[in-house]
Structure formats: structure tokens, C-alpha cells
Amino acid sequence: MMPLAVQFPAVAQKHIAIVDIGSNSIRLVVYDGLARTPSAIFNEKAVCALGQGLEGTGRLNPVGMAQAIEVVGRFVRLARAMDVSLLDILATAAVREASDGQSFVRAIEARTGVAVTVLSGEDEARLAALGVICAIPEADGMVADLGGGSLELVALDQGRFAGPHATFPLGVLRLTEASEGVRTMAEQRVDAHFRTIGWWHWGRARPLYAVGGAWRALARLFIAQTGHPLHVLDNFTLAPREAMRLMDLVARQSRKSLEKIPGLSKRRLMHLPIAALLLEKVVEYVEPSQLIFSVYGMREGQFYKRLPPDLQWQDPLIAACSAMAQTAGRFPEHGEEMVEWMRPLFTTETAAQARLRTAACLLGDVFWNEHPDYRAEQAFLRVFRLPFMGLGHQDRASLALAVYARYEGEGSLAQADDARSLLSEEAERHALLVGLALRLGHAVSGGVPGLLRTTRLQADFDKLVLLLPARDPAFAPDLNDRRYDRLARAAGFEGFEIRKV
């Protein structure tokens, strides 16, 4: 297996900003330069409901227009105060389709002096898909992006556009208005649009990636309903049958019951039944292998478009871990040495396991300055909950448990038990083995670069043996420790031995 390339981040550039003028809300996100993983340093949203009434009048909501002009003016002023190097203002379905959309755009441009890009349906669909690709480069299946004014569908084939895409006037605001809140009317309208598509097979038996604020609110509700141990929306995954059951449950919940769910915005509550219906219909037509919720969409797609090709091709997880090693680790290059040094213990690992092992090695010294009594716990919690882009919940649990074992986390930690509940026995064993190997490597070398390359792990019948150079004073003390027997047992050996040669 070819070693996984470690990508150290490029020199940070000035901040870049994106203003997203949606049918329901307007949002400013400022990112900390063009690095492989978008890091938002500022994120503010205002609900203006520009698309309210559009279905009946064909025009933007006049009250929302006045609010939106003020809000965008504020956002541009903030962006300029942050000295951003790039500022994109993007407008979506409501502005695109309203008869007075162009006059609204002219008012924004006159107020701010910044050009507004009104996205076509195709542009909006492709940017949403690029946002998913930014997080999951190998994304394969159907991307569905639900906004206030429209629903976009895009087919992906192993991280590339497969060709088909569609945009429908089925956003939560418009469908609510068009159906007058009556479920049967909404279903009929959705079916009428969906029957015009002849390429649903592109998503069949592949993942369906759900994008958009209304569906994120659903994911939050599903996590609460199922007692899922990790309250991270990105990459929350459900089997289609379980998803359909939960969506039916949402349809039967009273508003009072929904209001008790922690973290749910009251503004989202009124749209949850329509959002659930739309997702139910998409699942019904696509027949996916699994439903994956993505917190990355159009804005991240625009960010990804701005990246030079050499950054686009980087693995987002490895790039993020490399950046953490560079900024918080004592000797960042030691992580890459560790990857190669422990390789003899992982001769049968899969490419996915090798990726997680590389990430764990890069993070192996990031938490050195935490309080010793809480280092293992703090390292675990941070990795388990950090916003790593596109990292599945099982992989997140594996990575957190590996770092936990590296810092000798052996006590009773409820969150670690939660993480283990997400893993198969084999995945848990792999995480433990990575963590124990990290512990040994750091203990022997002191985390100092260059020393591990002079040592070697090898099998000797029923023993795991670490070979050390006899004449190197760095290894003069007796480094044997009974704790290392645990590493040997995890690797399938009966004991551990250090030999000087």
C-alpha cells in the first residue's frame, strides 16, 4: 500500500468572505484564507424571508427587501473592516425568479459598491455539489440541496459531476405557500415535478447527501430522537428505512413536542413537516444506500472553486491534521515519521484505516500542553467534537479513541464508551493499536524528530521486538516498561521485548 501523503498547509492568505442571499435568510461567512479546509472565523445570519409570497405574487417580499438591503450593507461593512481579500455576494432562487429581482440587485450594488452574482439553477446545484465534494472528495451518489425557494439535485460519480442535475421551485417557503400547508397538495406538487426526471437511477444504491438548513434541523431532531451519542450534524448517517420511520414520526409530532427538542430554532419549526416530506420524497425516488447529512453546501462550494488545483486535490482530513500539527505540535515532522515507523504493525489495513492512522499520528503530539491529569480526556473530547470536514461519525470515534489511548486514557470516560458504541470490534481494535503504538513511539523518542528512524519494530515468533541502536546514548537507559505488553497483545503477540543491536 502506498503511503498516504501528508499535506502541510500553505502560508495563510488574507480572509475571504461570502454573502449568501437566500430565499429565507442572508448569511455572511468569513473564512481564514484559502487553505484546503475552510475555517470560518465569522458567521452571521439574518432572516429576511425575501421569498415569502413569491409563489403568489411573483415578486420579492417588500418588507424583506428593505431588511435585506440593510443587512447586506452591514455584512459588506464588516467584511471590509476585516480587510478581506475576496468578497463574493451570491443570490439564489428568490432573486433569480422574482420579477423585481434585478431592481433589488441594483439597489444592493448601489448601496455596497460590490457586484452581486445571481446564480442560475444550474450554478446553484453545482455549487452545492462542490460543497459536498470539498468535504468528501470521493462523494458518489446524489446531492439534494433544499433552500427556501428551490430544491436542487445533482448526480455525482466518485467526486465528479455525472452530468444530470435539476432545480425545482420546491423550497420550504414556496412549497408551504403553494400547498397551503396541506400535505396531500404538497405531495402532488412534488410528484408532478419529480416525474419529469428520468435519471433517478444515478443515485440508486448510492449515498444521498442532504444539504440545507431545514434538513440540518431535521438531522438535529433525528439525533435527539435516536439517542445518537455524537451531537455532530455533519456526516450523521441513517439507513433509508430508519430515515423514513423518523420522517413519519416528525409528521405526527405536535409543534409543542417539537419545541422541546434542544437546539432547534423556533423559526425552523413551522417548516419541519414540509422539509420532512421533501426528504421523504427524495429518498423514495432515489432509493439510496444511505442518507448522509452534510453541513457543507453552496458557500463551501464557492470557497472550493476559489482554491488552486493543488489544494483541491489534498485530503481535507489530512490537511486539517497537518495544520493542527504545525500550529500546536512541538515537532510537526515527527508525525510523518511515526506513520512509517509503526507500519509493520498494520500490514493488512485498508486504505481507510491507513488514512485514520496517518491522521492520528499527525495529532499525536498536538495536546502536549494540556494539564497532565486531564490530557487524555481533553485530547479525546476535542478530537471527538472538532469540526473535521467530511469525517464520518465512526471514523471520528476511531480517531478520538486512538488519541485517547496515546495519552494513556484507560479510566472510565462516558464519552469514550459512547465512541466505542459506534464501532465494530475490528475498528475498536485498530484504534487501540494505533494509540498504543503512538504511546510507545513517543516514549522511546521523546517526540524528537530523527530518532525513530534509527529503530525498528519486528516480529520474533510470539514476541513483538523493538530494535534500538546500542551505541546511541538516547537509548542508553533501560526503556522496558510492562505497559508496552499491552501493545504487543493488541497486535496479536504474547509479549514485548526491547533489544539493542
Image (cartoon, rainbow, N blue to C red):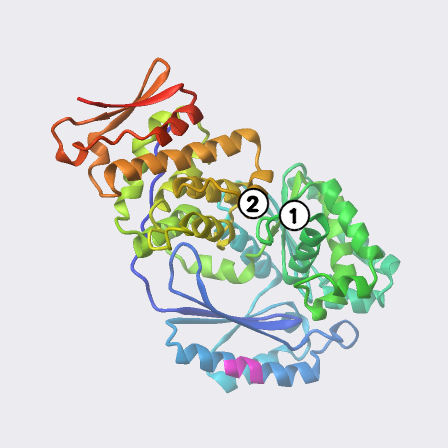
Give the mark toward the camera: 2 or 1: 1
Q: Nearer the viewer, residue 260 or 149?
A: 260
Find residue 172 and report its image quarter.
bottom right
Circle 2 sits on which residue? 393
Q: Is residue 335 left or right of residue 163?
A: left
Circle 1 sits on which residue? 228
Q: Nearer the viewer, residue 79 or 453?
A: 453
Q: Secondary structure at mark 1?
A: loop
Q: Are marks 2 and 1 in contact (CB under 8 Å)?
A: yes
The kind of residue on which mark 1 rests is His
Q: Secondary structure at mark 2?
A: helix
User: Where 236 sits versus 42, above or below?
Assistant: above
Q: Is residue 341 left or right of residue 208?
A: left
User: Where 336 sits versus 455, above or below?
Assistant: below
Query: Residue 71: within the magenta?
Result: yes
Which SS does the magenta portion mostly show? helix
Measured as percent of width and height from the top left, residue 314 is found at: 39, 47
Magenta segment boundaries in residue numbering: 70-74
Tell me which numbered mark, 2 or 1, is placed earlier along the sequence: 1
Q: Is residue 362 left or right of residue 212?
A: left
Res. 203 mark: none
